[in-house]
Amino acid sequence: MRIALVYPPPWKIPAPGQVPDPGGDGPPEGFRDGDIDADFLQTPYGLLSLAAQAIRWGHQVKVLNLSSFPWDEVERTIARLDADLFGMSSFTANRRGVGLVAKCIRAHHPSARIVVGGPHATALARETLSHHPEIDAVAIGEGEETLREVVERIGQGASLQGIAGLAWRSADQVEVGAPRARIAELDTLASPHGPFSPHLLMTSRGCPGSCSYCAKNAVWGKQWRAHSPAWVLSSLQHAAAHLPVKMLMIKDDTFTADRKRALEICRTMRERKLGLLWSCDTRADVLTEELVREMRLAGCQRISLGVESGSPSILKNIGKNITPDKVQAATKMARDVGLQVRWFMMLGNRGETAHTLRESLDFIRKGQPDQFIFACLSVYPGTRDFESLAKQGALDREVYFDGDFLELKMPFDASEQDTAVMSDWFERNKGLRELHRPGVEHYEAVLQRLGDFHAAHFDLASACYHDGQSERAEEHARRALDLGFPAPGLIWNLLGCIAASRSAWAEMRACFDQAHEQDPLHAVLARNRQAIKAWESSGGPLRLVASSEFQILERTQQPTLPGPLAADFDQWDS
Protein backbone atom coordinates (compact mmCIF):
# COMPACT_ATOMS: atom_id res chain seq x y z
CA MET A 1 0.00 0.00 0.00
CA ARG A 2 1.11 3.58 -0.68
CA ILE A 3 0.87 5.62 2.51
CA ALA A 4 1.52 9.38 2.70
CA LEU A 5 1.87 10.89 6.17
CA VAL A 6 1.57 14.66 6.06
CA TYR A 7 2.29 17.35 8.63
CA PRO A 8 0.21 20.27 7.34
CA PRO A 9 0.61 24.05 7.70
CA PRO A 10 -1.56 25.88 10.25
CA TRP A 11 -3.63 27.57 7.51
CA LYS A 12 -3.28 28.77 3.95
CA ILE A 13 0.10 30.47 4.24
CA PRO A 14 0.46 33.21 1.60
CA ALA A 15 3.61 33.19 -0.52
CA PRO A 16 5.96 36.20 -0.10
CA GLY A 17 4.27 39.25 -1.59
CA GLN A 18 0.93 37.47 -1.83
CA VAL A 19 -2.19 38.78 -0.09
CA PRO A 20 -3.76 36.46 2.51
CA ASP A 21 -6.52 34.13 1.38
CA PRO A 22 -9.62 36.27 0.69
CA GLY A 23 -11.91 33.47 1.86
CA GLY A 24 -10.71 33.74 5.46
CA ASP A 25 -8.56 30.61 5.42
CA GLY A 26 -5.30 32.52 5.84
CA PRO A 27 -3.47 33.72 8.97
CA PRO A 28 -5.60 34.91 11.90
CA GLU A 29 -6.17 38.60 12.36
CA GLY A 30 -3.21 40.24 14.06
CA PHE A 31 -0.84 37.35 13.29
CA ARG A 32 2.82 38.34 13.34
CA ASP A 33 6.04 36.62 12.41
CA GLY A 34 7.31 34.97 15.55
CA ASP A 35 3.88 33.90 16.81
CA ILE A 36 4.73 30.38 15.60
CA ASP A 37 7.72 28.99 17.47
CA ALA A 38 10.37 26.68 16.07
CA ASP A 39 8.96 23.62 17.85
CA PHE A 40 5.79 23.87 15.76
CA LEU A 41 7.79 23.24 12.59
CA GLN A 42 9.11 19.85 13.72
CA THR A 43 7.41 16.78 12.36
CA PRO A 44 5.66 15.11 15.31
CA TYR A 45 7.64 12.12 16.50
CA GLY A 46 4.43 10.09 16.50
CA LEU A 47 4.09 10.56 12.75
CA LEU A 48 7.62 9.21 12.26
CA SER A 49 6.79 6.26 14.51
CA LEU A 50 3.70 5.44 12.43
CA ALA A 51 5.85 5.58 9.31
CA ALA A 52 8.44 3.25 10.83
CA GLN A 53 5.76 0.68 11.70
CA ALA A 54 4.17 0.81 8.24
CA ILE A 55 7.57 0.34 6.60
CA ARG A 56 8.18 -2.70 8.83
CA TRP A 57 4.82 -4.11 7.68
CA GLY A 58 6.02 -3.92 4.09
CA HIS A 59 4.25 -0.80 2.85
CA GLN A 60 5.63 2.14 0.89
CA VAL A 61 5.61 5.27 3.06
CA LYS A 62 6.38 8.92 2.50
CA VAL A 63 6.53 11.55 5.26
CA LEU A 64 6.12 15.17 4.17
CA ASN A 65 6.56 18.17 6.47
CA LEU A 66 4.57 21.00 4.84
CA SER A 67 4.25 23.07 8.02
CA SER A 68 5.75 26.26 6.55
CA PHE A 69 4.93 25.75 2.85
CA PRO A 70 2.92 28.47 1.06
CA TRP A 71 -0.53 27.19 0.18
CA ASP A 72 0.05 27.23 -3.57
CA GLU A 73 2.97 24.87 -3.03
CA VAL A 74 0.92 22.67 -0.70
CA GLU A 75 -1.73 22.26 -3.40
CA ARG A 76 0.84 21.43 -6.06
CA THR A 77 2.47 18.91 -3.74
CA ILE A 78 -0.77 17.15 -2.83
CA ALA A 79 -1.89 17.09 -6.46
CA ARG A 80 1.31 15.26 -7.46
CA LEU A 81 1.29 12.79 -4.57
CA ASP A 82 -1.06 9.93 -5.36
CA ALA A 83 -1.48 7.64 -2.35
CA ASP A 84 -3.93 5.02 -1.14
CA LEU A 85 -3.97 6.33 2.42
CA PHE A 86 -3.21 9.83 3.69
CA GLY A 87 -2.58 10.38 7.40
CA MET A 88 -2.19 13.68 9.25
CA SER A 89 -1.28 14.80 12.77
CA SER A 90 -3.76 17.26 14.25
CA PHE A 91 -2.79 19.73 16.95
CA THR A 92 -4.77 22.74 18.09
CA ALA A 93 -2.30 25.01 16.29
CA ASN A 94 -2.70 23.29 12.89
CA ARG A 95 -6.33 22.14 13.16
CA ARG A 96 -7.42 24.54 10.39
CA GLY A 97 -4.65 23.34 8.11
CA VAL A 98 -5.66 19.72 8.68
CA GLY A 99 -9.16 20.47 7.43
CA LEU A 100 -7.88 22.45 4.45
CA VAL A 101 -5.40 19.76 3.41
CA ALA A 102 -8.11 17.12 3.77
CA LYS A 103 -10.25 19.10 1.30
CA CYS A 104 -7.29 19.37 -1.04
CA ILE A 105 -6.61 15.63 -0.87
CA ARG A 106 -10.25 14.79 -1.52
CA ALA A 107 -10.36 17.15 -4.52
CA HIS A 108 -7.28 15.64 -6.17
CA HIS A 109 -7.56 12.03 -4.98
CA PRO A 110 -11.26 11.29 -4.44
CA SER A 111 -10.77 7.56 -3.82
CA ALA A 112 -7.99 7.92 -1.21
CA ARG A 113 -8.68 7.26 2.47
CA ILE A 114 -7.93 10.08 4.91
CA VAL A 115 -7.26 9.32 8.59
CA VAL A 116 -6.31 11.96 11.16
CA GLY A 117 -4.74 11.48 14.59
CA GLY A 118 -2.93 13.57 17.18
CA PRO A 119 -3.94 15.21 20.47
CA HIS A 120 -6.46 17.72 19.09
CA ALA A 121 -8.36 15.19 16.99
CA THR A 122 -8.17 12.65 19.82
CA ALA A 123 -9.98 14.98 22.23
CA LEU A 124 -12.49 16.21 19.62
CA ALA A 125 -12.92 13.11 17.47
CA ARG A 126 -16.67 13.37 16.92
CA GLU A 127 -16.53 17.09 16.23
CA THR A 128 -13.61 16.70 13.83
CA LEU A 129 -15.54 14.22 11.70
CA SER A 130 -18.74 16.27 11.90
CA HIS A 131 -17.02 19.43 10.70
CA HIS A 132 -14.77 17.83 8.07
CA PRO A 133 -16.69 15.42 5.82
CA GLU A 134 -13.53 14.81 3.76
CA ILE A 135 -11.91 12.97 6.71
CA ASP A 136 -12.83 9.28 6.85
CA ALA A 137 -11.71 8.45 10.38
CA VAL A 138 -9.95 9.74 13.49
CA ALA A 139 -7.42 7.62 15.39
CA ILE A 140 -7.90 8.23 19.10
CA GLY A 141 -4.82 8.25 21.31
CA GLU A 142 -1.85 6.01 20.59
CA GLY A 143 -1.98 5.24 16.88
CA GLU A 144 0.35 2.40 15.92
CA GLU A 145 -1.93 -0.59 16.52
CA THR A 146 -4.95 1.32 15.23
CA LEU A 147 -3.09 2.11 12.02
CA ARG A 148 -2.26 -1.57 11.57
CA GLU A 149 -5.95 -2.48 11.57
CA VAL A 150 -6.86 0.47 9.34
CA VAL A 151 -4.27 -0.58 6.76
CA GLU A 152 -5.43 -4.21 6.88
CA ARG A 153 -9.07 -3.20 6.37
CA ILE A 154 -8.24 -0.90 3.46
CA GLY A 155 -6.12 -3.62 1.88
CA GLN A 156 -9.08 -6.00 2.12
CA GLY A 157 -11.49 -3.42 0.73
CA ALA A 158 -13.42 -3.62 4.00
CA SER A 159 -15.15 -0.99 6.12
CA LEU A 160 -13.30 0.74 8.96
CA GLN A 161 -16.33 0.22 11.20
CA GLY A 162 -15.72 -1.34 14.60
CA ILE A 163 -11.96 -0.75 14.90
CA ALA A 164 -10.95 -0.10 18.51
CA GLY A 165 -9.40 3.32 19.07
CA LEU A 166 -11.05 4.75 15.94
CA ALA A 167 -13.93 7.12 15.21
CA TRP A 168 -15.53 6.81 11.79
CA ARG A 169 -18.46 8.07 9.80
CA SER A 170 -21.36 5.71 9.15
CA ALA A 171 -23.90 7.29 6.77
CA ASP A 172 -24.72 10.59 8.46
CA GLN A 173 -23.63 9.46 11.92
CA VAL A 174 -20.28 9.48 13.69
CA GLU A 175 -19.47 6.31 15.59
CA VAL A 176 -16.64 5.59 18.01
CA GLY A 177 -15.07 2.20 18.60
CA ALA A 178 -14.13 0.72 21.95
CA PRO A 179 -11.11 2.27 23.68
CA ARG A 180 -7.86 0.68 22.58
CA ALA A 181 -5.51 -0.63 25.24
CA ARG A 182 -2.19 1.18 25.44
CA ILE A 183 0.85 -0.62 24.11
CA ALA A 184 2.30 -2.42 27.13
CA GLU A 185 5.69 -3.23 25.60
CA LEU A 186 6.96 -0.20 23.71
CA ASP A 187 10.06 -2.13 22.64
CA THR A 188 7.88 -4.05 20.18
CA LEU A 189 7.70 -0.87 18.09
CA ALA A 190 10.11 -0.18 15.25
CA SER A 191 12.30 2.84 15.93
CA PRO A 192 12.10 5.83 13.56
CA HIS A 193 15.91 5.78 13.81
CA GLY A 194 16.03 3.05 11.20
CA PRO A 195 14.26 4.29 8.11
CA PHE A 196 14.92 7.93 9.07
CA SER A 197 17.62 9.98 10.78
CA PRO A 198 15.61 12.45 12.85
CA HIS A 199 17.20 14.84 15.31
CA LEU A 200 14.44 13.84 17.75
CA LEU A 201 14.03 10.82 20.01
CA MET A 202 11.25 9.82 22.39
CA THR A 203 12.27 7.20 24.92
CA SER A 204 9.03 7.13 26.93
CA ARG A 205 5.36 8.03 26.75
CA GLY A 206 3.40 10.03 29.27
CA CYS A 207 4.44 11.77 32.46
CA PRO A 208 4.04 10.95 36.15
CA GLY A 209 2.64 14.46 36.67
CA SER A 210 -0.99 15.50 36.32
CA CYS A 211 -0.90 19.22 35.53
CA SER A 212 -4.21 20.90 34.79
CA TYR A 213 -3.08 22.43 31.48
CA CYS A 214 -1.53 19.29 29.93
CA ALA A 215 -3.27 16.93 27.48
CA LYS A 216 -0.82 14.03 27.73
CA ASN A 217 -3.32 11.76 29.51
CA ALA A 218 -5.73 12.00 26.58
CA VAL A 219 -3.08 10.68 24.20
CA TRP A 220 -0.81 8.44 26.28
CA GLY A 221 -3.00 7.50 29.22
CA LYS A 222 -2.27 8.05 32.90
CA GLN A 223 0.52 5.48 33.20
CA TRP A 224 4.09 6.45 32.31
CA ARG A 225 5.64 3.83 30.01
CA ALA A 226 9.18 3.61 28.72
CA HIS A 227 11.39 1.88 26.22
CA SER A 228 14.13 -0.25 27.71
CA PRO A 229 17.67 1.16 27.84
CA ALA A 230 18.66 -1.38 25.16
CA TRP A 231 16.01 -0.07 22.73
CA VAL A 232 16.97 3.53 23.46
CA LEU A 233 20.67 2.87 23.01
CA SER A 234 20.07 1.13 19.70
CA SER A 235 18.30 4.26 18.46
CA LEU A 236 21.06 6.48 19.82
CA GLN A 237 23.67 4.30 18.13
CA HIS A 238 21.89 4.79 14.81
CA ALA A 239 21.65 8.54 15.40
CA ALA A 240 25.36 8.77 16.16
CA ALA A 241 26.18 6.91 12.95
CA HIS A 242 23.81 8.75 10.60
CA LEU A 243 23.10 12.27 11.83
CA PRO A 244 25.05 14.82 9.76
CA VAL A 245 25.62 16.85 12.92
CA LYS A 246 25.84 14.90 16.17
CA MET A 247 23.10 16.76 18.02
CA LEU A 248 19.83 15.29 19.27
CA MET A 249 16.77 16.41 21.21
CA ILE A 250 15.19 13.87 23.57
CA LYS A 251 11.55 14.96 23.59
CA ASP A 252 10.05 12.87 26.38
CA ASP A 253 7.71 14.80 28.66
CA THR A 254 9.97 13.72 31.55
CA PHE A 255 13.14 11.94 30.45
CA THR A 256 14.37 11.28 34.00
CA ALA A 257 11.06 10.00 35.41
CA ASP A 258 12.87 6.72 36.14
CA ARG A 259 16.26 7.82 37.46
CA LYS A 260 17.74 4.31 37.44
CA ARG A 261 16.84 3.88 33.78
CA ALA A 262 18.21 7.32 32.85
CA LEU A 263 21.47 6.53 34.65
CA GLU A 264 21.86 3.27 32.75
CA ILE A 265 21.27 5.01 29.42
CA CYS A 266 23.79 7.75 30.18
CA ARG A 267 26.49 5.42 31.49
CA THR A 268 26.17 3.14 28.48
CA MET A 269 26.35 6.13 26.13
CA ARG A 270 29.70 6.95 27.73
CA GLU A 271 30.93 3.35 27.59
CA ARG A 272 30.10 3.13 23.89
CA LYS A 273 31.57 6.57 23.20
CA LEU A 274 28.55 7.53 21.11
CA GLY A 275 29.74 11.10 20.70
CA LEU A 276 26.38 12.90 20.74
CA LEU A 277 25.35 16.25 22.16
CA TRP A 278 21.76 16.28 23.36
CA SER A 279 19.08 18.05 25.32
CA CYS A 280 16.05 16.86 27.25
CA ASP A 281 12.98 18.03 29.14
CA THR A 282 12.27 16.96 32.70
CA ARG A 283 10.95 17.94 36.12
CA ALA A 284 12.84 19.39 39.05
CA ASP A 285 11.77 16.61 41.41
CA VAL A 286 13.35 13.75 39.44
CA LEU A 287 16.97 14.92 39.37
CA THR A 288 19.91 14.06 41.62
CA GLU A 289 23.54 15.15 41.72
CA GLU A 290 24.64 11.73 40.49
CA LEU A 291 22.19 11.81 37.60
CA VAL A 292 22.96 15.31 36.31
CA ARG A 293 26.68 14.51 36.39
CA GLU A 294 26.18 11.33 34.35
CA MET A 295 23.90 13.19 31.93
CA ARG A 296 26.53 15.85 31.39
CA LEU A 297 29.35 13.36 30.84
CA ALA A 298 27.11 11.48 28.37
CA GLY A 299 26.84 14.63 26.25
CA CYS A 300 23.80 16.44 27.62
CA GLN A 301 24.13 20.16 26.92
CA ARG A 302 20.81 21.54 28.12
CA ILE A 303 17.90 20.56 30.31
CA SER A 304 14.55 22.31 30.18
CA LEU A 305 12.53 22.30 33.38
CA GLY A 306 8.77 22.75 33.45
CA VAL A 307 8.67 25.31 36.25
CA GLU A 308 5.53 27.25 35.21
CA SER A 309 5.45 29.60 38.21
CA GLY A 310 7.42 30.88 41.16
CA SER A 311 4.25 31.19 43.21
CA PRO A 312 3.59 28.27 45.59
CA SER A 313 -0.15 28.89 45.34
CA ILE A 314 -0.15 28.65 41.53
CA LEU A 315 1.95 25.48 41.61
CA LYS A 316 -0.61 23.97 43.98
CA ASN A 317 -3.56 25.13 41.87
CA ILE A 318 -2.29 23.46 38.69
CA GLY A 319 -1.27 20.22 40.39
CA LYS A 320 2.43 20.65 39.63
CA ASN A 321 3.56 18.89 42.82
CA ILE A 322 6.87 20.73 43.02
CA THR A 323 8.07 23.65 45.14
CA PRO A 324 10.18 26.69 44.25
CA ASP A 325 12.89 25.39 46.57
CA LYS A 326 13.01 22.09 44.68
CA VAL A 327 13.35 23.97 41.37
CA GLN A 328 16.16 26.12 42.71
CA ALA A 329 18.04 23.10 44.06
CA ALA A 330 17.71 21.23 40.76
CA THR A 331 18.88 24.27 38.81
CA LYS A 332 21.98 24.63 40.96
CA MET A 333 22.80 20.91 40.65
CA ALA A 334 22.58 21.09 36.88
CA ARG A 335 24.55 24.31 36.52
CA ASP A 336 27.29 22.98 38.80
CA VAL A 337 28.13 20.37 36.15
CA GLY A 338 27.94 22.86 33.28
CA LEU A 339 24.45 22.07 32.00
CA GLN A 340 22.57 24.95 30.47
CA VAL A 341 19.25 25.28 32.27
CA ARG A 342 16.10 26.58 30.60
CA TRP A 343 12.90 27.23 32.51
CA PHE A 344 9.48 26.93 30.89
CA MET A 345 7.16 29.46 32.56
CA MET A 346 3.45 30.20 32.19
CA LEU A 347 1.04 33.10 32.61
CA GLY A 348 -2.69 32.91 33.25
CA ASN A 349 -3.03 29.68 35.23
CA ARG A 350 -5.69 29.13 37.88
CA GLY A 351 -5.52 31.94 40.45
CA GLU A 352 -2.99 34.01 38.48
CA THR A 353 -2.76 37.70 39.42
CA ALA A 354 -0.32 40.54 38.90
CA HIS A 355 1.08 39.61 42.32
CA THR A 356 1.77 35.97 41.38
CA LEU A 357 3.46 37.20 38.18
CA ARG A 358 5.77 39.33 40.33
CA GLU A 359 6.46 36.25 42.47
CA SER A 360 7.53 34.39 39.32
CA LEU A 361 9.78 37.21 38.14
CA ASP A 362 11.41 37.49 41.56
CA PHE A 363 11.94 33.73 41.56
CA ILE A 364 13.61 33.84 38.14
CA ARG A 365 16.02 36.51 39.35
CA LYS A 366 16.78 34.40 42.42
CA GLY A 367 17.07 31.07 40.62
CA GLN A 368 19.27 32.34 37.76
CA PRO A 369 18.45 29.89 34.96
CA ASP A 370 20.50 30.45 31.83
CA GLN A 371 17.31 30.99 29.83
CA PHE A 372 13.60 31.24 30.42
CA ILE A 373 10.54 31.50 28.22
CA PHE A 374 6.98 32.40 29.13
CA ALA A 375 3.85 31.08 27.46
CA CYS A 376 0.33 32.29 28.06
CA LEU A 377 -2.07 29.60 29.17
CA SER A 378 -3.45 27.86 26.09
CA VAL A 379 -6.58 25.82 26.68
CA TYR A 380 -6.23 22.50 24.88
CA PRO A 381 -9.04 19.97 24.43
CA GLY A 382 -8.39 16.94 26.60
CA THR A 383 -7.04 18.90 29.57
CA ARG A 384 -8.55 19.46 33.00
CA ASP A 385 -8.59 23.18 32.23
CA PHE A 386 -10.68 22.54 29.13
CA GLU A 387 -13.15 20.33 30.98
CA SER A 388 -13.46 22.80 33.88
CA LEU A 389 -14.10 25.80 31.63
CA ALA A 390 -16.55 23.86 29.47
CA LYS A 391 -18.44 22.69 32.56
CA GLN A 392 -18.64 26.28 33.83
CA GLY A 393 -20.05 27.41 30.49
CA ALA A 394 -17.02 29.63 29.91
CA LEU A 395 -15.89 27.64 26.87
CA ASP A 396 -17.80 26.20 23.92
CA ARG A 397 -15.88 23.48 22.09
CA GLU A 398 -17.27 24.82 18.80
CA VAL A 399 -14.82 27.71 19.13
CA TYR A 400 -12.08 25.35 17.91
CA PHE A 401 -13.92 25.06 14.60
CA ASP A 402 -15.31 28.59 14.31
CA GLY A 403 -12.26 30.52 15.50
CA ASP A 404 -9.19 31.29 13.41
CA PHE A 405 -6.78 31.60 16.37
CA LEU A 406 -3.49 29.70 16.46
CA GLU A 407 -4.09 28.51 20.02
CA LEU A 408 -6.84 29.49 22.45
CA LYS A 409 -4.93 31.69 24.88
CA MET A 410 -7.04 32.86 27.79
CA PRO A 411 -6.40 33.40 31.49
CA PHE A 412 -8.27 30.83 33.53
CA ASP A 413 -9.89 33.16 36.02
CA ALA A 414 -7.87 36.40 36.19
CA SER A 415 -9.58 39.75 36.68
CA GLU A 416 -9.74 42.20 33.80
CA GLN A 417 -7.18 44.44 35.50
CA ASP A 418 -4.73 41.59 36.19
CA THR A 419 -5.19 40.29 32.65
CA ALA A 420 -4.26 43.71 31.26
CA VAL A 421 -1.10 43.84 33.41
CA MET A 422 -0.03 40.33 32.40
CA SER A 423 -0.79 40.89 28.71
CA ASP A 424 1.23 44.10 28.65
CA TRP A 425 4.20 42.41 30.34
CA PHE A 426 4.01 39.42 28.01
CA GLU A 427 3.99 41.54 24.85
CA ARG A 428 7.19 43.21 26.01
CA ASN A 429 8.92 40.00 27.10
CA LYS A 430 7.74 37.21 24.79
CA GLY A 431 10.15 34.70 23.34
CA LEU A 432 13.26 33.04 24.72
CA ARG A 433 15.12 35.30 27.16
CA GLU A 434 18.79 34.99 28.00
CA LEU A 435 19.31 35.67 31.68
CA HIS A 436 22.61 34.33 32.86
CA ARG A 437 25.94 33.79 31.10
CA PRO A 438 28.39 32.09 33.47
CA GLY A 439 31.94 33.40 33.44
CA VAL A 440 35.43 31.96 33.48
CA GLU A 441 35.43 31.17 37.19
CA HIS A 442 32.24 29.11 36.90
CA TYR A 443 33.54 27.00 34.02
CA GLU A 444 36.91 26.51 35.69
CA ALA A 445 35.02 24.97 38.61
CA VAL A 446 32.98 22.79 36.23
CA LEU A 447 36.14 21.52 34.53
CA GLN A 448 37.64 20.69 37.90
CA ARG A 449 34.51 18.75 38.90
CA LEU A 450 34.20 16.81 35.64
CA GLY A 451 37.84 16.24 34.79
CA ASP A 452 39.34 16.33 31.30
CA PHE A 453 35.96 16.49 29.51
CA HIS A 454 35.63 17.92 26.00
CA ALA A 455 32.44 19.95 26.54
CA ALA A 456 33.78 21.48 29.76
CA HIS A 457 36.90 22.60 27.88
CA PHE A 458 34.79 24.12 25.11
CA ASP A 459 32.56 26.01 27.55
CA LEU A 460 35.64 27.35 29.33
CA ALA A 461 37.18 28.31 25.98
CA SER A 462 34.08 30.32 25.08
CA ALA A 463 34.05 32.04 28.46
CA CYS A 464 37.75 32.90 28.16
CA TYR A 465 37.20 34.35 24.68
CA HIS A 466 34.38 36.60 25.89
CA ASP A 467 36.60 37.66 28.80
CA GLY A 468 39.41 38.70 26.44
CA GLN A 469 41.67 35.76 27.34
CA SER A 470 42.38 34.66 23.78
CA GLU A 471 45.40 32.46 24.48
CA ARG A 472 43.58 30.48 27.15
CA ALA A 473 40.53 30.28 24.92
CA GLU A 474 42.56 28.74 22.12
CA GLU A 475 44.26 26.30 24.49
CA HIS A 476 40.97 24.92 25.81
CA ALA A 477 39.30 24.96 22.39
CA ARG A 478 42.05 22.82 20.89
CA ARG A 479 41.92 20.48 23.87
CA ALA A 480 38.17 20.03 23.29
CA LEU A 481 38.94 19.27 19.65
CA ASP A 482 41.58 16.70 20.63
CA LEU A 483 39.13 15.01 23.02
CA GLY A 484 36.53 14.57 20.27
CA PHE A 485 33.93 17.26 20.95
CA PRO A 486 30.93 16.06 18.88
CA ALA A 487 30.32 19.43 17.18
CA PRO A 488 33.77 20.43 15.88
CA GLY A 489 32.25 23.09 13.63
CA LEU A 490 31.56 25.20 16.70
CA ILE A 491 35.17 24.87 17.85
CA TRP A 492 36.53 25.88 14.44
CA ASN A 493 34.15 28.84 14.51
CA LEU A 494 35.56 29.91 17.88
CA LEU A 495 39.14 29.43 16.67
CA GLY A 496 38.30 31.59 13.65
CA CYS A 497 37.04 34.35 15.93
CA ILE A 498 40.20 34.08 18.05
CA ALA A 499 42.38 34.33 14.92
CA ALA A 500 40.43 37.41 13.79
CA SER A 501 40.99 39.06 17.17
CA ARG A 502 44.73 39.03 16.51
CA SER A 503 44.39 39.93 12.80
CA ALA A 504 45.60 36.51 11.63
CA TRP A 505 43.43 36.69 8.52
CA ALA A 506 44.69 33.63 6.66
CA GLU A 507 44.29 31.50 9.78
CA MET A 508 40.83 32.98 10.33
CA ARG A 509 39.70 32.03 6.82
CA ALA A 510 41.08 28.51 7.20
CA CYS A 511 39.23 28.03 10.50
CA PHE A 512 35.93 29.22 9.07
CA ASP A 513 36.37 26.97 6.05
CA GLN A 514 36.79 24.06 8.46
CA ALA A 515 33.71 25.18 10.42
CA HIS A 516 31.64 25.35 7.24
CA GLU A 517 32.81 21.91 6.14
CA GLN A 518 31.78 20.43 9.49
CA ASP A 519 28.36 22.11 9.78
CA PRO A 520 27.31 24.07 6.67
CA LEU A 521 23.74 24.66 7.89
CA HIS A 522 24.50 26.10 11.34
CA ALA A 523 22.98 29.61 11.39
CA VAL A 524 25.81 31.30 13.30
CA LEU A 525 28.52 29.72 11.17
CA ALA A 526 26.71 30.74 7.99
CA ARG A 527 26.33 34.33 9.22
CA ASN A 528 30.03 34.54 10.03
CA ARG A 529 30.97 33.39 6.52
CA GLN A 530 28.65 36.01 5.06
CA ALA A 531 30.16 38.68 7.33
CA ILE A 532 33.66 37.76 6.12
CA LYS A 533 32.58 37.95 2.47
CA ALA A 534 31.02 41.38 3.01
CA TRP A 535 34.13 42.58 4.85
CA GLU A 536 36.42 41.33 2.09
CA SER A 537 34.40 43.05 -0.63
CA SER A 538 33.58 46.38 1.00
CA GLY A 539 35.72 46.75 4.11
CA GLY A 540 34.33 48.20 7.31
CA PRO A 541 34.16 46.51 10.71
CA LEU A 542 34.20 42.72 10.88
CA ARG A 543 31.66 41.53 13.43
CA LEU A 544 31.85 37.81 14.17
CA VAL A 545 29.87 35.70 16.61
CA ALA A 546 31.60 33.07 18.74
CA SER A 547 28.66 30.85 19.67
CA SER A 548 28.69 27.73 21.81
CA GLU A 549 24.90 27.48 21.60
CA PHE A 550 23.25 24.08 21.23
CA GLN A 551 21.35 24.60 17.95
CA ILE A 552 19.51 22.11 15.81
CA LEU A 553 16.41 23.62 14.27
CA GLU A 554 18.19 25.75 11.67
CA ARG A 555 18.93 22.65 9.61
CA THR A 556 15.65 22.45 7.73
CA GLN A 557 15.78 19.03 6.13
CA GLN A 558 12.89 16.70 5.31
CA PRO A 559 11.22 14.81 6.77
CA THR A 560 11.79 16.21 10.26
CA LEU A 561 11.64 19.89 9.25
CA PRO A 562 9.98 21.68 6.31
CA GLY A 563 12.94 21.74 3.96
CA PRO A 564 12.77 21.40 0.18
CA LEU A 565 11.21 18.20 -1.09
CA ALA A 566 13.20 15.83 -3.28
CA ALA A 567 12.50 16.20 -6.99
CA ASP A 568 11.04 12.68 -7.07
CA PHE A 569 9.06 12.94 -3.84
CA ASP A 570 5.92 11.75 -5.65
CA GLN A 571 7.47 8.59 -7.11
CA TRP A 572 6.61 5.15 -5.74
CA ASP A 573 8.20 1.80 -6.39
CA SER A 574 6.37 -0.05 -9.14
Image: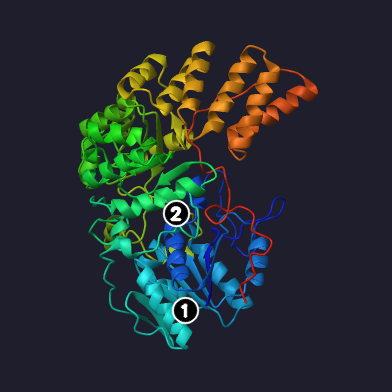
Q: Amino acid at mark 2?
A: Glu
Q: Nearer the viewer, residue 366 or 326?
A: 326
Q: Vertically, is 11 above or below 469?
A: below
Depth check, front residue: 69 or 241: 241
From this viewpoint, which residue is outermost toward the right? Answer: 537
Relative image position of residue 344 (x, y in whole percent): 36, 39
Element assignment for label 1: loop
- Examine the rendered structure and indicate whether residue 523 appears above or below residue 454: below
Residue type at tag 1: Asp
Q: Residue at x 51, y 42 (%)?
A: 552
Q: Which mark is residue 458?
A: none
Q: Residues within 10 Å of mark 2 (few under 14, many from 20)?
A: some
Q: What residue is drawn where x is 59% and y is 63%?
A: 25
Look at the numbered disc 2 and give the secondary structure of its residue: loop
In the image, what residue occupies the spot 27% across and 46% down? 350
Q: Earlier in the sequence, mark 1 or mark 2?
A: 1
Q: Does residue 86 appear to the left or right of 263 in the view shown? A: right
Residue corresponding to mark 2: 407
| Image coords of residue 22 (percent x, y) | 65, 62
Residue picked out by circle 1: 136
Question: Between marks 1 and 2, how big is the CA–CA gap?
Answer: 25 Å
Q: Can see residue 37?
A: no
On the image, the x and y values in percent for residue 337 come to: 32, 27
Q: Nearer the viewer, residue 302 or 119?
A: 302
Question: Percent from the top left, x then y, of residue 258?
Answer: 23, 47
Asked if residue 273 can be seen in this view, the reply is yes
Viewer-proximal residue, 554 or 231?
Answer: 231
Q: Are marks 1 and 2 in contact (CB under 8 Å)?
A: no
